[in-house]
Amino acid sequence: MVKNNPLGKIKTTWMNETETITDLMTTNTDNKEKNIAAKEECGPEKDQKKDRRIYILSQEKPSLAVVKLGVPLIAGMFIMVLYNLVDTYFIGLMRDDYQLAAVNLAYPVMMISIAISNMIGTGASSLIARSLGAEDGAKARHTLTVGFELTIFNSLLVTAVGMVFLSAIVRGLGARSNTFEYTRQYVQVILLGSIFTMGNYTFGQLLRSEGSVKHSIAGMIVGTVVNIILDPLFIFTLGLQIRGAAIATILGNAAGMCVSLWMYGRGKTLLTPSLRYLKPTGEILREIFWVGVPATLETLLTSAAYIVNNNLAVEYGELTVAAMGIAQKILSLGNYIYQGFAAGTQPIMGYNYGAANYKRMKDVLRAGLLVVSGTELCVMAVYGIFAPQLIGIFTDSPEVISTGSRVLRTIMCILPFVGAVSMSRMSFQAMGKPQFAFAITLVRQFVLYIPLLLLLNRLFGFGGMIWAQPVTEMIMMAASVALLLGIIQREDRGGVQDAAQCR
């Protein structure tokens, strides 16, 4: 998931390195060599203060910085909402609720692919962001190149393992007689296209790590448009039904990945991969996996909780699974809002942690929490009023609409709280402290959510089960924010003590 996260233009920061980071133990010759290396990495000279992206990270008013980096991501994530909903919408047009249920059952496979992508994307992005904050352009570029290599390797591994255990995976997802074959078809295509899904996700994260938010959004937009165009073609015109939806999804991801690669290839980014950095160093690998593995485990734990939830819901009928799937995908609109703000905050926190500017970190956190909670309350009101109409977009089944509306009006209660949890986790990742981010997820999913899911289901049935997540997020908001502020305050006191000792 390290002082870290997505960040800004630095093509000349390091050219002034001898003026800004002079070390008493470093000779003039050493400083000259560093300057030369910096020029080779960063290109034409440019004053850091004139770089808009660095200014946003380091000096912009906290609330404006959060909005400027968060809103473009949210706009892109709204596109991702369409990406997630488009399959559901077109499959719903077939009036086959079992295929709708199958898409929901297969979703954890996509989540697991993203989890593995997250290992490299979060780990590498964190290191890139901290390296930029510390004015080490060579290390940032080396990390980017290693991130590309690891993404390709991991995607091929996922495809190979997934295809070997395909049937066992589908059964584990909770598919039954009416949904097994549909789920198998969808999962098979998703696994075969892992390189595109994982590449699209990771390369977008790497773009954001240097502050190139708009470039990462371009890939999201192109991928979604391709998916929307191809879905009706493959589902209806070619008669491939749910398999066609999966193929359209993979081709959309492929298009998005190609956009990111084009950005790097055309030199539109601050950093570019380089053949000279193909060989990873032990330090870079350790840094990537130190932050990335906990980030992956977090998403895997979320996937495990999702599977437990689906298996409990199946006991109430496969149409209940379809209803829950629709409600959860509609909720994803609100989810992407807090995720966008949290992701936008991450590079700011990483940069300022690298620069030891703890006061700004606290200011950014407070501003971010106010912005995200206020926005989510508005989204929550819309869901509460229009729940039946929103569910009805995807199905005309009265049973599915009734159950889906009930679910949506319950799980929407997470929105004012979960943004703070996400922002805290991403801040810890940005700071290079993934153990705290992982602890938040571990407590959230295994200490609170899954036990509450089982307990409330046993005591109150389906109505109790769907309240497990809102209760969990209420508790976790208070705990995660208190932990983050405590760690920042501790680091700040340590920095003051070190400065006093130097004097």
Image: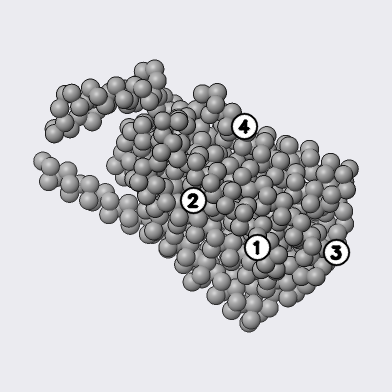
| Residue 350 visible at all | no
Whole-angstrom CA distance, mark 4 to mark 3, is: 42 Å
Q: Is residue 74 above or below residue 52?
A: below
Depth order, front residue of 414/355: 355
Crowdedness of circle 3 by 10 Å Cα count: few (<14), some, many (20+)?
few
- Image-based side of 430 in relation to 419, left or right: left
Whole-angstrom CA distance, mark 3 to mark 2, is: 41 Å
Whole-angstrom CA distance, mark 2 to mark 1, is: 22 Å
Whole-angstrom CA distance, mark 4 to mark 2, is: 22 Å
- The tag on residue 259 is 4
Residue mark closest to the camera, 2 vs 1:
1
Among the two numbered marks 3 and 1 on one chain, the one whose residue lies closer to the N terminus: 1
Identify which residue is drawn at 51% across, 32% down.
Answer: 212
Q: Are marks 3 and 2 in contact (CB under 8 Å)?
A: no
Name the residue that disc number 2 marks: 119
Residue mark closest to the camera, 3 vs 1:
1
Name the residue that disc number 3 marks: 398
Disc 2 secondary structure class? helix
Q: Is residue 251 above or below residue 319?
A: above
Identify which residue is drawn at 53% across, 46% down.
Answer: 153
Among the two numbered marks 2 and 1 on one chain, the one whose residue lies closer to the N terminus: 2
Q: Amino acid at mark 3?
A: Pro
Hey, which residue is sitting farthest bottom in the picture?
459
Residue mark closest to the camera, 4 vs 3:
4
Disc 1 secondary structure class? loop
Q: Amino acid at mark 2?
A: Met
Name the residue that disc number 1 marks: 165
Q: Are marks 3 and 1 in contact (CB under 8 Å)?
A: no
Q: Are marks 2 and 1 in contact (CB under 8 Å)?
A: no
Q: Quadrant of the C terminus?
A: top left
Whole-angstrom CA distance, mark 4 to mark 1, is: 32 Å
Crowdedness of circle 4 by 10 Å Cα count: few (<14), some, many (20+)?
many
